[in-house]
């Protein structure tokens, strides 16, 4: 877990709890909506729906993938419902805007969410113009991180040399395939239970608590 400065041609950012601080807690809103969706879809009470939701996340990489695999769900209805949230808890972030401007190299978002959700959040932050693209769950053929196929397709779609790329994530297990492909990995620790899943491996090069100060160190 080196603290040395990183050199890269491509910077790959996760979205939720990565580009915005975890204390915005947008995922709490999404979590409630996922539970309601599962409850309605399967005709079960909210407590049981929550158990199913978390089981599918653990076993399939996302609740959506579990619903698709086990119940034949068409994904767009789910995505539209769970991402219809209030993003105003995310404040504009001039410091992030400034450091992204100074950070040399291509910048791409790689998220298990949707382009629409990512765009809403990035617009609130005031950083959309820094990114050449958003590789979302649609682009990944609905196979979420940490499925290796999602990373392979990302690298192919954006013509990225993984040995010249850095990936920043708040969920440790999602960095395992990135490391295996030769990417430099940065784990942004979070208080959410799922953040530390897979954190005990040797696939994490940098562990940080706050994105902006770390990026500022990279451009100093």
Image: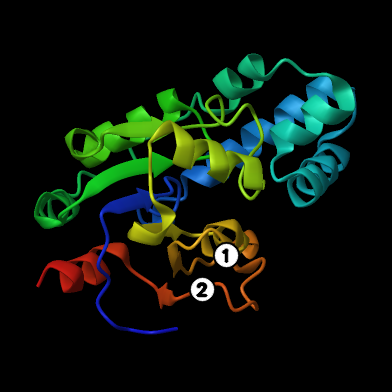
Between the C-alphas of marks 2 and 1, the distance is 8 Å
Which quadrant of the view contains residue 151?
top right
27 up-or-down from 128: above or below: below
Residue 211 in the image, given as x and y percentages of width and height: 31, 63
Q: Nearer the viewer, mark 2 or mark 1?
A: 2
214 up-or-down from 136: above or below: below
Instruction: Report if the CB atoms under discs 2 and 1 are less than 8 Å apart.
Output: yes
What quarter of the picture does the N terminus occupy? Answer: bottom left
Q: Is residue 35 left or right of residue 138?
A: right
Which mark, by number, is residue 58?
A: none
Q: Mark 2 or mark 1: which comes first in sequence?
A: 1
93 up-or-down from 116: above or below: below
Which quadrant of the view contains residue 192?
bottom right
Does the rendering let one see residue 19? Answer: no
Judging by the rendered image, the residue that carries numbered circle 2 is 204
Judging by the rendered image, the residue that carries numbered circle 1 is 172
Element under disc 1: helix
Q: Is residue 58 left or right of residue 32?
A: right
Residue 31 in the image, given as x and y percentages of width and height: 63, 41
Element under disc 2: loop
Q: Is residue 81 left or right of residue 135?
A: right
Residue at point 70% right, 46% down?
61
């Amino acid at each position: 877990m080196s603290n040395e400065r990183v050199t890269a041609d491509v910077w790959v950012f996760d979205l939720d709890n990565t580009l915005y601080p975890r204390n915005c807690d947008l995922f709490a809103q999404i979590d409630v909506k996922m539970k309601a969706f599962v409850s309605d879809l399967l005709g079960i009470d909210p407590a049981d729906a929550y158990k199913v939701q978390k089981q599918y996340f653990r076993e399939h990489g996302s609740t959506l993938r579990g619903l698709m695999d086990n119940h034949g769900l068409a994904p767009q209805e789910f995505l539209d419902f769970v991402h219809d949230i209030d993003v105003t808890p995310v404040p504009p972030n001039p410091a992030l805007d400034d450091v992204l401007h100074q950070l040399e190299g291509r910048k791409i978002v790689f998220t298990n969410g949707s382009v629409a959700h990512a765009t809403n959040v990035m617009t609130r932050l005031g950083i959309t113009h820094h990114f050449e693209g958003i590789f979302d769950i649609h682009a990944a053929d609905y196979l979420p991180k940490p499925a290796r196929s999602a990373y392979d397709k990302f690298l192919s779609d954006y013509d990225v040399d993984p040995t010249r790329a850095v990936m920043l994530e708040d969920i440790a297990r999602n960095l395992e395939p990135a490391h295996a492909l030769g990417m430099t990995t940065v784990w942004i620790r979070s208080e959410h239970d799922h953040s530390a899943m897979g954190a005990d491996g040797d696939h994490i090069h940098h562990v940080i608590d706050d994105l902006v100060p770390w990026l500022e160190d990279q451009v100093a």
